[in-house]
Amino acid sequence: MYNETIRIGTLAQPKASYIKQILPHGFESFSITFWQTLGETDLKKLAREVKEVLADSSAVISSLGIYGNPLKDDDKAKETRDGWKKCIDAAHLFGCDLVCGFAGRVVDKPINESMPRFKQVFEPLAKRAADKGVRLAFENCDMGGDWTRGDWNIAMTPKCWEMMFNAVPMDNIGLEWEPCHQMVKLIDPMPQLRKWVKKIFHLHGKDATVYWDVVREHGVRGPEPFAFHRTPGFGDCNWTDIISELRRAGFKGSIDIEGWHDPVYRGELEMTGQVHGLDYLKQCRGGAYVENPQ
């Protein structure tokens, strides 16, 4: 019987065949992820296929994810909003209660100007989710935006989160947090984690490396890259501390590795890096679960 309350997994394509192929590496959870739209995916059919693949394992589907800008008014945004609805309605078919994604943004306007539209879109989605026992979590990725301009996601900093949760004050909305997005802005993720841990529903397992010598010589607005995303185990994060804080707060859920960003472990080394990250995070978690003597 699986007794670990914090699982280590990975993001997965919406294909049961993909999950089946990587399951033997020891991933304990999978976050099934869509970009902007569900496309032609039949969620009921996918859920049946995934359930069959996972039947003889203790692995689970941690969440469904739809990443687009649902606050815009174009056709793609409508598809993203429809994707949120369909994922909310289908979450139970996958045995999960969590749907994740971007909060969206009114394009190239200061973040505070997105709040009325955020409330308009996500208040009914959060109520729909609450009625079905589903939680919503927003990734803390800035997608290249800042406080004044951007085109994808407002859920990037604590001030933004305060405004979002005040606009839609419901207990079933929270964060899909990853330390990488803070580190590349030179933010220490640990104080933020301790303050916001009760609102963190899901974690992306992604790390970062900061070249402090470049920061000291060139600053952060010059042409020299000073930080980049990494697979856990190759960057600067202290994941032992992160997982310890999660345990202290009683977190129960998944850290799912977000690959495909590491500048070294990519291409033919992608899964090599992800499996290293998986094993590394398991060790940071304390190793294999050991039952206490009676």
Image (cartoon, rainbow, N blue to C red):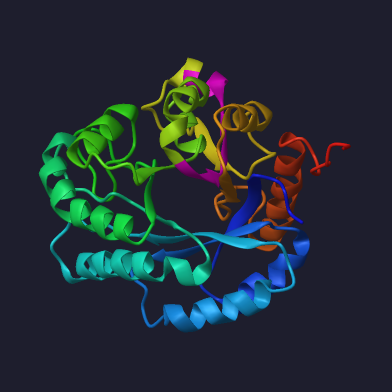
| Magenta residue span | 201-215
Residue located farthest toward the right when viewing the structure as drawn? 293
Asked if residue 106 shows in the view, the reply is no
Is 181 covered by the magenta stretch? no
Residue located farthest toward the front when viewing the structure as drawn? 294
**Does 24 sit left or right of 95 as displayed?**
right
Which residue is painted at 77% across and 66% down in the image? Answer: 24
Q: Main secondary structure of the magenta part?
A: strand
Q: Is residue 28 above or below residue 157?
A: below
Q: Where does the C terminus fall, quadrant-wise?
A: top right
Q: Is residue 14 above or below residue 63?
A: below
Find residue 173 and report its horizontal and vertical position in percent. Answer: 33, 45
Is 214 covered by the magenta stretch? yes
Find residue 171 and report its horizontal and vertical position in percent. Answer: 33, 41
> Foreground residue, 64 or 261?
64
Residue located farthest toward the top when viewing the structure as drawn? 216
Which residue is painted at 29% across and 67% down in the image? Answer: 85
Find residue 279 and report its horizontal and vertical position in percent. Answer: 76, 47
Find residue 136 and report its horizontal and vertical position in percent. Answer: 36, 51
